[in-house]
Image: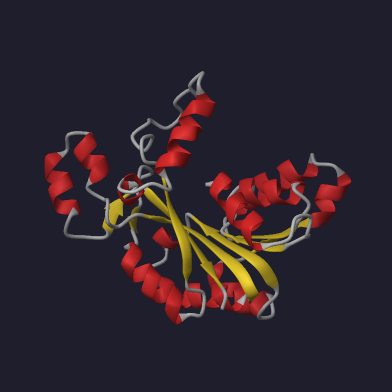
């Protein structure tokens, strides 16, 4: 996903330009910190105190220049209009968040308002068109059959969450003024790997395979996650 995001940033903005980035639901700050290290001005928005503490501990160990380029704030996607003016950011990330939001459309509209003209909205969502894949690959035939009829599912941590169908998100993005520019699949061959599994020795080859599949039909359509990139018109 990071490679996909970098590809979109490189294709949309001049090389060396310091971008204003908002990471909504930044978690431990992995992507926010990576972009700050690349020279961008990054704001991370997170509501989980434990995640905020973890991100701040990691940031504290970075060089001063990177610490100055990244700020961490408490809040979530519903708060963007409270904290920021419309058009304040060149790039807005919302990765792994919408599955926890019962009504995503107002959140997405708020994120789009944060974008400057030509800005990039990067979403990572659970693929509602492929929910039967995981139970099917595990041999849970009843679970796979039920998954065809719903966008609700239970994640690995035991939470009842929701997925998004690409066609519906495409329509939503068009309606909020950030139409879909391109999309990728994420987690095509690795979705069934157990949590905490050791990284393989040929990790670069694995990443190359996932990256190729993530942009190639029909593989990307059955990915566990979708990475959708909209552009503010």
Quarter of the view holding residue 166: bottom left
Name the spot of residue 5 as percent of width and height, x first: 57, 52
Task: Give the number of marks.
Answer: 0
In the image, what residue occupies the spot 62% across and 50% down? 6
Q: Nearer the viewer, residue 84 or 113?
A: 113
From the viewer's perspective, tell me whether residue 113 is left or right of residue 68: left
Q: Residue at x 38, y 46 (%)?
A: 216
Kindly give the residue lying farthest to the right in the view shown.
Answer: 64
Which of the 4 quarters of the picture holds residue 210? top left
**Residue sitting at x 54%, y 49%:** 4
Residue in the foreground of this view, choosing between 93 and 173: 173
Tell me the quadrant of the picture where the C terminus can be found.
bottom right
Left or right of residue 182: residue 163: left
Frontmost residue, 14 versus 153: 14
The answer to whether residue 131 is visible is yes
Residue 4 horizontal side relative to residue 227, left or right:
right
Residue 35 is situated, as x and y percent measured from the top left of the image, at 70, 51
Q: Which residue occupies 34% across, 54% down?
A: 127
Which x, y percent locates residue 86? 66, 80
Relative placement, left or right, of 141 versus 66 is left
The answer to whether residue 50 shows anywhere in this view is: no
Residue 118 picture location, percent across and down: 63, 73
Residue 81 found in image quarter: bottom right
Q: How is the image coloured?
A: secondary structure
């Amino acid at each position: 996903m990071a490679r996909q995001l970098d590809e979109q940033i490189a294709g949309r903005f001049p090389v060396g330009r310091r971008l204003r980035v908002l990471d909504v639901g930044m978690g431990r700050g992995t992507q926010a910190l990576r972009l700050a290290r690349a020279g961008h001005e990054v704001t991370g928005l997170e509501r989980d105190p434990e995640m905020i503490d973890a991100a701040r501990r990691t940031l504290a160990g970075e060089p001063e220049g990177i610490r100055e380029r990244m700020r961490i704030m408490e809040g979530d996607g519903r708060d963007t209009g409270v904290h920021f003016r419309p058009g304040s950011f060149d790039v807005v990330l919302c990765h792994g968040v919408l599955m926890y939001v019962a009504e995503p459309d107002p959140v997405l509209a708020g994120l789009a308002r944060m974008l400057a003209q030509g800005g990039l909205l990067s979403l990572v969502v659970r693929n509602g068109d492929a929910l039967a894949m995981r139970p099917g690959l595990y041999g849970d035939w009843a679970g796979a059959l039920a998954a065809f009829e719903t966008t609700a599912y239970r994640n690995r941590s035991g939470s009842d969450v929701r997925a998004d169908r690409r066609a519906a998100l495409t329509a939503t993005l068009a309606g909020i003024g950030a139409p879909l520019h391109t999309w990728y699949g994420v987690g095509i061959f690795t979705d069934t790997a157990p949590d905490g599994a050791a990284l393989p020795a040929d990790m670069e080859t694995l990443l190359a395979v996932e990256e190729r599949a993530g942009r190639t039909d029909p593989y990307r359509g059955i990915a566990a996650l979708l990475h959708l990139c909209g552009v503010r018109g």
